[in-house]
Image (cartoon, helix red, strand yellow):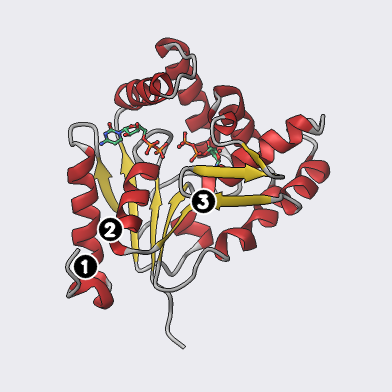
Amino acid sequence: TRVVPVIAIDGPSASGKGTVAARVAATLGWNYLDSGALYRLTALAAQRAGVAWDDEPAVAAIAAGLDVVFAEGSIRLAGEEVEDAIRQEEISSGASQVAVLPSVRAALLFRQRAFCRAPGLVADGRDMASVVFTDAALKVFLTASVEARAERRYKQLMAKGIAARLQPLLLEMQQRDDRDRGRSVAPLQQDANASLLDTTDIPIDVAVARVLDWARAVVPDIAGAAV
Ligand code: CDP
Ligand code: CDP
């Protein structure tokens, strides 16, 4: 049996991981995993069930039992479209609170690995390289200045018609990044084998092209493909 190649893309909030990962996956015709969505869904489902985000056994049970269907541009939780609901800032914060709980992370581990199917997978998150897909063919750590990231997230939310203010957004983002970097399980950090890509001053197309160049260099299957 052949190993399914994985491209792992990690980084702080709004560094461009999701956009870059989805476009690389579409270009290669590979599967795509937005692992952050699973933490967001867990936070949303807990909130709806009246479960506090720090109630570890109850939140872990919710994570293990998530009834979710992913499709392009759509995420259904128990049949309901929640793509916009999970992007709210309150749920972003909730996601990073449930993400510190070890049994929640354990409950989501196999669900994430199940996305690893032929011909390949591009996965984005915080611990794709360090925990979930340690043997990924390519590991990328995406960053950008916090100001650039806050501005991008602000524009992204406004474009979706989700109310936001720049300054509070920047502060919340910093708080969340600190929590993600400081937690004891699977903290956000650049993996020793990850290539660093700072997108502060480069447009998204250039970031996508860079990742595709790196991928071609390490994945023989796509080296010759016209991508
Ligand atoms: O997934 P992550 O939170 O890391 O970020 P994203 O949702 O992919 O990107 C946040 C926003 O920044 C999106 O609207 C992207 O289009 C935008 N972006 C950008 O303008 N330039 C980049 N180099 C990267 C992302
Ligand atoms: O789009 P953005 O980068 O702002 O967030 P996200 O990737 O959707 O992740 C939301 C939260 O889930 C993060 O702040 C992390 O606390 C958590 N998360 C995680 O712990 N591990 C992952 N692999 C992905 C997300």
Q: Which mark is residue 33?
A: none
Q: Amino acid at mark 3?
A: Ala
Q: Is residue 41 above or below residue 220?
A: above
Coordinates of residue 196 in the picture (x, y in percent):
27, 49
Left-right relation of 56 to 191: right
Left/right of residue 83 with respect to residue 156 in the rendered view: right
From the top left corner, tell me how far across and down residue 48 is, in percent: 76, 31
- In the rendered image, residue 24, in percent from the top left (x then y), is placed at 30, 55
Q: Secondary structure at mark 1?
A: helix
- The label shown at residue 71 is 3
**What's the CA distance linking mark 3 and mark 1?**
27 Å
For label 1, the crowd category at 10 Å Cα-Cα, with few meaning under 14, some 14 to 19 and many 20 or more, is some
Which residue is found at the position 23% from the left and 32% from the top? 200
Q: Nearer the viewer, residue 65 or 105?
A: 65
Q: Are marks 2 and 1 in contact (CB under 8 Å)?
A: no
Q: Amino acid at mark 1?
A: Arg
- The quadrant holding residue 99 is top right
Residue where numbered disc 1 is placed: 216
Observer-side mark, 2 or 3, equals 3
| Dot placed on the residue nearer the N-terminal end, 2 or 1 | 2
**Residue in the picture at 70% in, 55% down:** 107
In the image shown, does 56 or 190 lie closer to the viewer?
56
Disc 2 residue type (three-letter): Thr
Name above or below for residue 61 compared with residue 95. Answer: below
Q: Residues within 10 Å of mark 3 (few under 14, many from 20)?
A: few
Disc 3 or disc 1, which is closer to the eye?
A: 3
